[in-house]
Amino acid sequence: MKKIIFVFGLIISLSSLLFLSCKREEEKLPPAINFKTGSNYTQNNAMVEIGGKLSFGIHARGTSTEITNFTVKKVLQDGSVITVMDTGLYSMTLDLNMVFYQNVEDKVTWKFAVMDRNHLSAEISMVVNKDSNSTFGGIYYYPSIKLGYQNNTQYGHFLNPSTGNVYTEDSATAHQGDIDVLCYYIIDEDLPSPVISSPGEMDNYSTEARTYYPCIINWQTRKYTKWDISVGDTPISSSAFDAAQNDSLLIVSYHDVWGKKKFKWATAGKIIPFLTAGGKKGLIKVISADTVDTGSMEFAIKIQQ
């Protein structure tokens, strides 16, 4: 009888240990995220002038499973939240060096968060203050720029927005490090679509730019301009564009979360915010845009000096 009791007790003990072991194995831990350190990165409570560069180094890792989402948000003093980035991924690690630019807000808490496949998350934050001595900067203004589409032989296709210089395919290669803008024409969703883009589009999972302008395939420098596609939600008025004498309107008009590799349906009257690879913000006001691939586009442009 004692043997039976002993064996029964041993089975219960082993079962308990196995149950506890399984519980420990099933325990789900959140991912980990941290800032990289070093003098090259923006520090907590930094004072930065309007338009100044903000550099953040982020490292994250999944603890129990893969990371599936990464977000960057700005929390303003009044508690309102601006989503700067919200992107999906599927990786055990995340290693980023990110550059943004100081806007006009006096104080911002930057929040960086990751979420894993188990919907567990981790977050870090940093406060950045606007330098109270900041002043708005000057702009370059070109009231009439004409670019030709891919089958147009009258106008060049490539633009340096800081100088207003337009280049043909023959001359563009020699100036590839200066070119931030190009344009072409497509039919998209059965609608005619004049497109404003940049040489760096081909490095971001898109084929149109390199198809229409194959010369850029061999360029050593393909600068990538991001275009704010949210203008349909909060359009900038033509009168506001015309009245802008400094870069204040340019700074507040561009939203990182809406910055994409091209702007489609760039039709007359559209005012399009953009950010160049060199960190210059600008606005394009489309004056006219033909709806044939042998046509051209005319626009006015304002860009930070």
Image (cartoon, rainbow, N blue to C red):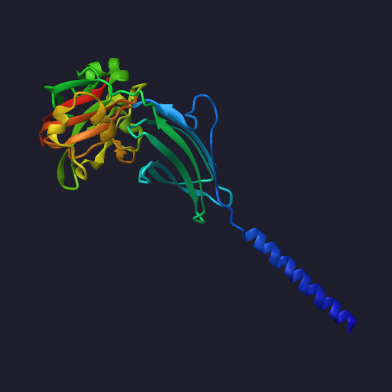
The residue drawn where x is 10% and y is 34% is: 290
Coordinates of residue 291 in the picture (x, y in percent): 11, 37
- The quadrant in which residue 252 appears is top left
Residue ranking furthest to the bottom: 1
- The quadrant in which residue 23 appears is bottom right
Q: Is residue 174 left or right of residue 18?
A: left
Coordinates of residue 219 in the picture (x, y in percent): 34, 22
- Specify the quadrant that holds the N terminus: bottom right
The residue drawn where x is 16% and y is 21% is: 142
- Specify the quadrant that holds the C terminus: top left
Q: Is residue 99 left or right of residue 158?
A: right
- Looking at the picture, does residue 118 appear above or below residue 248? below
- The quadrant in which residue 138 appears is top left
- Looking at the picture, does residue 235 appear above or below residue 280? below
Query: Is residue 97 in view from this perspective?
Result: yes
Q: Nearer the viewer, residue 126 or 280?
A: 126
Coordinates of residue 239 in the picture (x, y in percent): 12, 32
